C-alpha cells in the first residue's frame, strides 16, 4: 500500500527536482535519475548526501574540508560519516534537525540496496537543500528531539529489521505535537512493523485505513488490520473490531461477534467497550434487554473515565432511568465530571439545571457560567439562553447590551429565534 503511494509521489518529485537542478546543478539532476530504479543505486545515493554535506559546510565557510579525505581508500559512505563527525556542531546549526537526522540515518546504513523507501528520505533532503536553505528554520531543542536515539532506532529498524523499532519510528513520525509530523513516513514504518506481526502497528494501520489518513479510506482493510491485532490480544483493536461488527462497517452487522469482542476489550479495561455494551443491554441488541446490566456497564465506563458514559450516567440519575431512583446530586456529579473533559452538552445541561433551579436551588450565576462554557465551544442554544437571561431573567438586572451581544452571536450561528428577537429589540 505505502510503496504504491510512494512510487507515484516520488516519480513526480524526481521529475520536479530534475527540472529544478538541471540549471542549478546538472550533477544532481543526473544522479537523481539513478534513484528511480527498483534497486537503489547505493553509490549514487551516498554521493548525493556527500555533495549536500559539502555544500552546506562551504556555506558555513569551512574551507579546510580536504583534511577529511586524506585516506583515498575511504568509501563515499565513510567520507559522509567523516564529514558529519568532523563538523557535527556546525551542521547542527546549518540544518533543521529532522533533515540532519535523515542525513545521519541514510549515510550510516549498510543494507539499503533493496530499501526503495529510502529514496523518499533522500528526496526530502535534496528538496530542502535546493528550495529552503534561505528560509528561517526553527531548531528543535535537544530535550525535544534526541537525534542520536532516533539514528540508532533507524538503524535497528532497517539493518536489523526490528519490528518494535519500526513501530517506534512510525510513532515518531506520527506525533502531531512534534515538528517532525509526517504521516506518510509513519505509514511506511507501520507497514514494515505490521508485516512482522507487530500488533501496535497493525492497530495503527487499521486507524489509518478506517479514517483515510495518508491513504484512501478502506473499511475492509481496516477490519483486516484490526482483526490481526485483536487476535494477538490488542485491546483497542478488539474494541474497534467490535465497533465494525456493531455498525456493519466493512463487514455485515453481527451483534454476536460485536459482543464477543466488546466483552474481550472491556475485560482489558477499554472504557469505550464498556459503554457500547451498555447500549447493547439497554436496547437489546444481540442480547436480552437488561436495565441492570446496562446501568452497570455505563457506570464502569464512566468510572474508567469515558466522557460519553459520564454524561449519560448523569442523565440516568437526573431522570431516574434504568430502574434507578432519581438522584439530582449524583446526576450533577457525573455531569460535572463530563464537563471537566469539555463535554459541550454537559456544559449546556449544567447551565440549564442551575438557571432553572432543577437541582432544588436556583443559582443564576452558575447557570450563566456553564452556558458561557457551552457558548464558547460554539453551542447555539447556549448563546440563545444567555441572551434570554440578560434580556428578561427576573433573577438579575436586565443588561440589554449583553443580551444583544449573545442574541447576535446566536443569530450569526443560525438561530431564527435570536434573529427575530433582535428585530424586536431594534425599536428599544
Image (tube, helix red, strand yellow):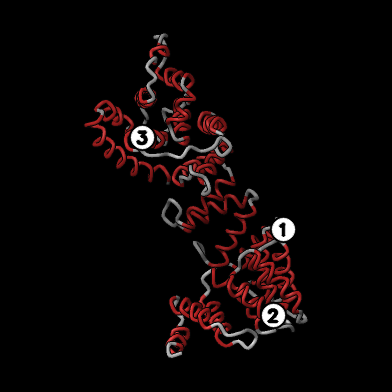
**SS for tag 2?**
loop
Q: CA distance from mark 1 to mark 2?
A: 42 Å
Q: Position of residue 176 (x, y in %)?
A: 51, 49
Q: Position of residue 387 (x, y in %)?
A: 53, 81
Mark 1 surroundings: few (<14), some (14-19) or many (≥20) residues within 10 A = few
Residue 363, disc: 2
Quick check: 218 left or right of 397?
left
Q: In this figure, which residue is indicated by the disc labeled 3?
A: 133
Q: CA distance from mark 2 to mark 3?
A: 60 Å
Q: Position of residue 305 (x, y in %)?
A: 69, 62
Task: Give above or below for 140 relative to 88.
Answer: below
Which of the two residues, 220 or 408, is positioned nearer the viewer here?
Answer: 408
Residue 13, disc: none
Q: Earlier in the sequence, mark 1 or mark 2?
A: 1
Mark 3 surroundings: few (<14), some (14-19) or many (≥20) residues within 10 A = some
Which of the two residues, 243 or 260, is positioned nearer the viewer here?
Answer: 243
Q: Position of residue 212 (x, y in %)?
A: 45, 56
The residue depicted at 47 percent of the width and 36 percent of the height is 98
Q: In this figure, which residue is indicated by the disc labeled 1?
A: 267
Q: Nearer the viewer, mark 2 or mark 3?
A: 2
**SS for tag 3?**
loop
Quick check: 161 left or right of 266?
left
Quick check: 189 left or right of 311?
left
Amino acid at each position: 500500500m505505502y510503496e504504491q503511494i510512494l512510487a507515484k509521489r516520488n516519480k513526480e518529485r524526481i521529475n520536479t527536482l530534475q527540472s529544478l537542478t538541471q540549471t542549478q546543478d546538472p550533477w544532481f539532476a543526473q544522479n537523481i535519475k539513478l534513484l528511480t530504479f527498483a534497486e537503489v543505486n547505493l553509490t549514487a545515493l551516498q554521493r548525493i548526501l556527500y555533495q549536500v554535506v559539502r555544500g552546506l559546510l562551504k556555506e558555513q565557510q569551512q574551507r579546510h574540508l580536504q583534511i577529511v579525505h586524506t585516506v583515498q581508500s575511504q568509501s563515499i559512505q565513510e567520507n559522509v560519516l567523516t564529514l558529519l563527525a568532523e563538523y557535527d556542531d556546525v551542521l547542527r546549526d546549518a540544518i533543521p534537525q529532522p533533515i540532519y537526522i535523515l542525513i545521519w540515518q541514510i549515510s550510516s546504513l549498510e543494507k539499503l540496496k533493496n530499501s526503495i523507501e529510502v529514496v523518499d528520505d533522500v528526496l526530502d533532503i535534496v528538496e530542502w537543500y535546493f528550495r529552503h536553505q534561505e528560509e528561517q528554520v526553527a531548531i528543535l531543542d535537544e530535550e525535544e528531539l534526541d537525534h542520536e536515539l532516533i539514528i540508532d532506532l533507524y538503524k535497528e529498524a532497517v539493518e536489523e529489521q526490528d519490528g518494535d523499532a519500526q513501530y517506534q519510528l512510525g510513532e515518531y513520525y506520527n506525533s502531531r505535537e512534534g515538528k517532525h509530523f509526517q504521516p506518510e513516513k509513519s505509514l511506511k514504518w507501520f507497514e514494515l512493523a505490521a508485516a512482522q506481526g507487530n500488533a501496535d502497528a497493525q492497530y495503527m494501520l487499521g486507524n489509518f485505513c478506517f479514517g483515510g489518513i495518508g491513504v484512501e479510506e478502506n473499511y475492509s482493510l481496516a477490519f483486516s488490520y484490526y482483526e490481526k491485532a485483536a487476535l494477538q490480544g490488542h485491546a483497542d483493536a478488539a474494541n474497534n473490531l467490535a465497533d465494525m461488527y456493531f455498525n456493519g462497517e466493512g463487514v455485515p452487522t453481527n451483534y454476536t461477534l460485536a459482543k464477543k469482542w466488546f466483552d474481550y476489550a472491556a475485560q482489558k479495561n477499554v472504557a469505550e467497550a464498556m459503554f457500547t455494551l451498555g447500549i447493547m443491554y439497554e436496547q437489546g441488541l444481540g442480547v436480552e434487554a437488561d436495565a441492570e446490566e446496562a446501568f452497570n456497564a455505563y457506570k464502569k465506563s464512566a468510572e474508567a473515565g469515558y466522557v460519553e458514559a459520564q454524561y449519560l450516567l448523569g442523565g440516568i440519575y437526573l431522570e431516574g432511568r434504568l430502574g434507578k431512583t432519581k438522584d439530582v446530586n449524583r446526576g450533577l456529579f457525573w455531569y460535572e465530571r463530563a464537563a471537566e473533559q469539555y463535554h459541550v452538552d454537559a456544559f449546556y445541561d449544567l447551565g440549564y439545571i442551575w438557571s432553572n433551579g432543577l437541582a432544588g436551588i436556583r443559582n443564576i450565576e452558575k447557570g450563566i457560567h456553564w452556558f458561557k462554557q457551552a457558548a464558547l465551544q460554539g453551542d447555539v442554544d447556549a448563546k440563545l439562553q444567555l441572551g434570554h437571561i440578560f434580556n428578561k431573567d427576573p433573577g438579575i438586572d436586565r443588561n440589554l447590551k449583553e443580551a444583544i451581544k449573545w442574541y447576535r452571536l446566536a443569530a450569526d450561528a443560525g438561530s431564527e429565534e435570536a434573529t427575530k428577537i433582535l428585530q424586536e429589540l431594534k425599536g428599544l
